[in-house]
């Protein structure tokens, strides 16, 4: 009897998992599963303690789902990627594995690790990889010159055309094989520094994620285009944490959307949400086409010459939500408390760090990864490079968000601000975005900082710094 091994990574689910389904295709094969945690990822702050906890909770749930199907899941912890190759080798020998099944990860180090695994196994273990975390494989949506698109809109048009021609199919969860495993094999707890997850915001389990997707696609997705920019409103799906670690697949999202809104591919209800899923694809495809993005290099080379300021005090004020700009501070406190931030606010705080404080976008990118429950290298790098005007299809460098008017536009009455900054609860609506103006009229002082920069002056300084860098090209 052949033994098949499924190597789980960012695909912690049994439904629509291409590697798992392929491993189970032969009804006579014995199937086992492994997850290898690598310590260097949290030491380098590439993963937040909250995301580590989210992964751990989902591993427990996956362990049960697999055991119910007669598949045992083993967890190992190693130091770095090199050790994971050794660990896999030893495991395969001990379990007499004939074939290894895994879903591709597109980050550079992960791809190098996988190449090393395939090389180490030679012809002893057959390795099969799958493009599972994307709707269409990187490299399959290209320009007429077979190059990766550098601008999102033509990429999105070509992408939708491909989807209209043929939709990527979902695969079903494997059926029970042999006997259901008893709950005796306990999972090895890996010693990540972990931080509690608010399970009211992010319920644990694959079925919970599927329920949330179904609920969102019923009605909210049709209102998404109107509500998605207002952080006080629950107008987005909040599925990013599940998509980032693969508790949910993008194919499941697409099929559920089209079941409820068949016209989404033709620009009907749900089309704007589909577009967000395509942004996710765009950034993943870019990582493969331009591996330098994984090394945190800017896409536009001259932007590396911007003379960034090293201001630790202002950087800490930004991290802690103490900049004196209410919309920025409320957003950062939401991030620090929950591990999630609304998309509009990610753009606002990123712009503030880079364009108001002139601090290197990579500092913000790293801080986000150290806090986010949905941390994802491709989307995070793409978002930061967009905001810093250093990436493909980025905002032009001379377009600079004004943090006060962004607050006025997207949180007009300050509902979101008051939720996260209780110290501003007594400030009237009229001054909620400029509390320092109100404070100056009061006999008592407000327990809230004054703005740490003057936006107008900061804007001029940033434009000058980008201009100098551009001329040095
Ligand atoms: P919805 O609006 O419901 O969108 C559905 C899904 O589409 C999301 O769950 C996500 O998987 C994907 N998506 C939506 N917008 C984007 C986008 N602009 N780029 C790529 N994918 C998108 N997203 C992450 O998943 N991980 C990150 O680490 C991350 N870092 C970001 C950093 C910055 C500076 C910016 C500007 C954006 C970042 N995003 C990141 C993208 C986006 O902010 C989040 O995906 C979104 O806020 C998640 O909320 P949601 O699930 O309710 O999204």
Image: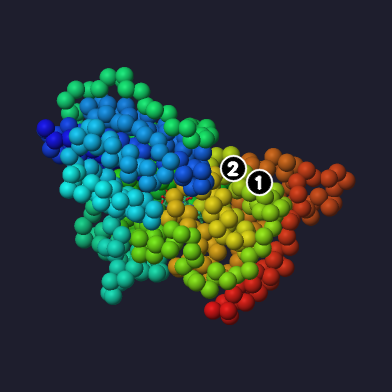
130 lies left or right of 206:
left
Relative to 145, say whether 282 is above or below: above
Q: Residues within 10 Å of mark 2 (few under 14, many from 20)?
A: some
- Single out the residue that lies furthest toward the right: 443
Please tell me how many numbered marks the rendered image carries. 2
Q: Residues within 10 Å of mark 1 (few under 14, many from 20)?
A: some
The mark nearer the N terminus, 2 or 1, is 1
Relative to 365, say whether 7 is above or below: above
* Discs 2, 1 touching: Cβ within 8 Å: yes
Secondary structure of the residue carrying tag 1 is helix
Q: Residue at x 28, y 57 (%)?
A: 137
Look at the image and tell me in which quarter the N terminus lies: top left
Q: Residue at x 74, y 55 (%)?
A: 451
Residue 350 pos. (x, y %): 57, 57
> Can residue 193 be seen in this snapshot?
yes
> On residue 234, which mark appears?
none
Q: Nearer the viewer, residue 272 or 3?
A: 3
Look at the image and tell me in which quarter the C terminus lies: bottom right
Residue 16 pos. (x, y %): 26, 42
Q: Residue at x 60, y 72 (%)?
A: 466
Q: Which residue is mark 2?
A: 336
Q: Which residue is mark 1?
A: 320
Q: Nearer the viewer, residue 86 or 16?
A: 86
- For the residues marked 2 and 1, what is the alpha-carbon distance in whole angstroms? 8 Å
Quarter of the image where one finds residue 61:
top left
Secondary structure of the residue carrying tag 2 is helix
Residue 98 pos. (x, y %): 17, 39
Q: Residue at x 58, y 71 (%)?
A: 305
């Amino acid at each position: 009897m052949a033994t098949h091994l499924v190597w789980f990574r960012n695909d912690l689910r049994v439904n629509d998992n291409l590697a798992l389904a392929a491993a189970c295709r032969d009804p006579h094969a014995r199937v086992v599963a492994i997850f290898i945690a690598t310590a260097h990822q949290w030491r380098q702050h590439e993963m937040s303690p909250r995301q580590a906890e989210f992964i751990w909770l989902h591993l427990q749930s996956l362990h049960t789902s697999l055991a119910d199907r007669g598949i045992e899941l083993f967890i190992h912890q190693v130091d770095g990627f090199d050790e994971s190759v050794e660990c896999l080798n030893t495991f395969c020998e001990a379990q007499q594995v004939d074939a290894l099944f895994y879903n591709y990860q597109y980050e550079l180090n992960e791809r190098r690790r996988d190449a090393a695994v395939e090389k180490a196994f030679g012809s002893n273990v057959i390795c099969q990889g799958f493009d599972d975390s994307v709707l269409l494989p990187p490299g399959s949506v290209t320009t007429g010159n077979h190059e990766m698109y550098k601008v999102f809109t033509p990429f999105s048009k070509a992408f939708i055309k491909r989807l209209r021609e043929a939709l990527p199919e979902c695969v079903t969860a494997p059926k029970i094989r042999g006997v259901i495993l008893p709950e005796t094999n306990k999972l090895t707890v890996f010693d990540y520094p972990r931080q509690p997850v608010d399970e009211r915001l992010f319920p644990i389990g694959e079925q919970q994620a599927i329920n949330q997707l179904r609920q969102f696609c019923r009605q909210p997705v049709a209102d998404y285009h109107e509500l998605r920019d207002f952080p006080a409103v629950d107008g987005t799906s909040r599925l990013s944490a599940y998509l980032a670690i693969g508790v949910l697949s993008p194919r499941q999202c697409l099929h559920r959307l089209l079941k409820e809104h068949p016209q989404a591919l033709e620009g009907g209800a749900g089309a704007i949400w589909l577009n967000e899923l395509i942004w996710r694809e765009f950034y993943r495809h870019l990582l493969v086409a331009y591996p330098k993005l994984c090394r945190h290099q800017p896409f536009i080379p001259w932007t590396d010459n911007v003379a960034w300021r090293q201001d630790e005090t202002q950087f800490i004020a930004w991290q802690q939500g103490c900049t004196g700009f209410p919309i920025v501070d409320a957003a950062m406190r939401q991030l620090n408390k929950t591990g999630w931030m609304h998309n509009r606010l990610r753009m606002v705080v990123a712009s503030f760090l880079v364009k108001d404080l002139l601090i290197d976008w990579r500092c913000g990118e790293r801080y986000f990864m150290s806090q986010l429950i949905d941390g994802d290298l491709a989307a995070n790098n793409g978002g930061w490079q967009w905001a810093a005007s250093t990436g493909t299809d980025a905002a032009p460098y001379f377009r600079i968000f004004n943090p006060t008017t962004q607050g006025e536009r997207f949180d007009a009455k300050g509902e979101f601000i008051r939720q996260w900054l209780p110290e501003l609860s007594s400030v009237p609506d009229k001054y909620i975005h400029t509390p320092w103006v109100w404070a100056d009229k009061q006999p008592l002082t407000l327990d809230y900082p004054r703005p740490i920069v003057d936006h107008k002056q900061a804007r001029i300084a940033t434009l000058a710094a980008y201009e100098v860098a551009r001329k040095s090209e």
